[in-house]
Image (cartoon, rainbow, N blue to C red):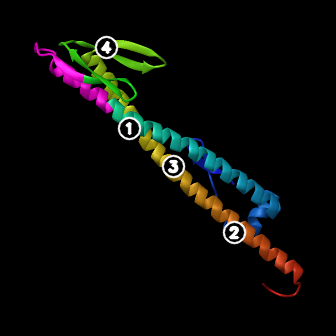
Amino acid sequence: MAESGRRGIPAASFVEDVHTFLTSTGSDATSALNTLQERLQQYKLVEMKLLAQQRDLQAKIPDIKKCLETVETLQAKQHTDEATTVDFEVAEGIYSQARIEATNSVCLWLGANVMLEYSCDEAIDLLKKNLENATSSLGAIVEDLQFLRDQVTITQVTIARVYNWDVQQRRKQRQPGKDV
């Protein structure tokens, strides 16, 4: 059933002839339907995980852009004696004003309660790299989701074809001698 896939997502095979499919897999319609339903549930689980990753990246990218813009602004004012007044978030929804003197370094949160001090140039390079990585990861996730949706559709069509074939075979067994 599964052929090559994309990034660990197995590809679904379109079943042209249900009888040949069942014969080649050595299963009856009921077990084939169970296997296909199980595969469909696996696809749905992967889709949920990918959608969560997509939401996380969609939230992370604007934060990275905002941080990059802030560091670039600080760097631009680095060679002036002009202080910068900014609003910063103390807690969710609570802001305070701060006056930042000209500086050549900034502290960046790296995650896991870790903050490191970088020069403005290093911080800009790091943030640009993080933005590039997040953007490319988001693109890959969007492609994975499209591939996954195609596999879900193929699997759903296969389930319908196997089910309809099974119904047709049962009708033929009930009414011998008649073509349905």
Q: Residues within 10 Å of mark 1 (few under 14, many from 20)?
A: some
Of marks 2 and 3, which one's residue comes earlier in the chain?
3
Q: Which residue is mark 2?
A: 161
Q: Is residue 70 left or right of residue 19?
A: left
Of marks 1 and 3, which one's residue comes earlier in the chain?
1
Element at label 4: strand
Residue at the image point whose x is 40% and y is 28% from the top: 92
Tell me the amino acid under the disc marked 2: Arg
Q: Is residue 16 magenta?
A: no
Whether 140 is drawn above or below 33: the answer is: above
Q: Which residue is mark 3?
A: 145
Labels 1 and 2 touching (C-beta < 8 A): no
Residues at marks 2 and 3, CA–CA distance in whole angstroms: 24 Å
Tell me the amino acid under the disc marked 1: Thr
Tell me the amino acid under the disc marked 4: Tyr
Q: Is residue 83 magenta?
A: yes
Of marks 4 and 2, which one's residue comes earlier in the chain?
4
Give the quarter of the image for residue 78. Answer: top left
Residue at the image point whose x is 51% and y is 47% from the top: 144
Q: Residues within 10 Å of mark 4 (few under 14, many from 20)?
A: some
Q: Which residue is mark 1?
A: 135
Give the quarter of the image for residue 139. Answer: top left
Please say whether residue 31 is visible from this viewpoint: yes
Residues at marks 1 and 3, CA–CA distance in whole angstroms: 15 Å
Of marks 4 and 3, which one's residue comes earlier in the chain?
4
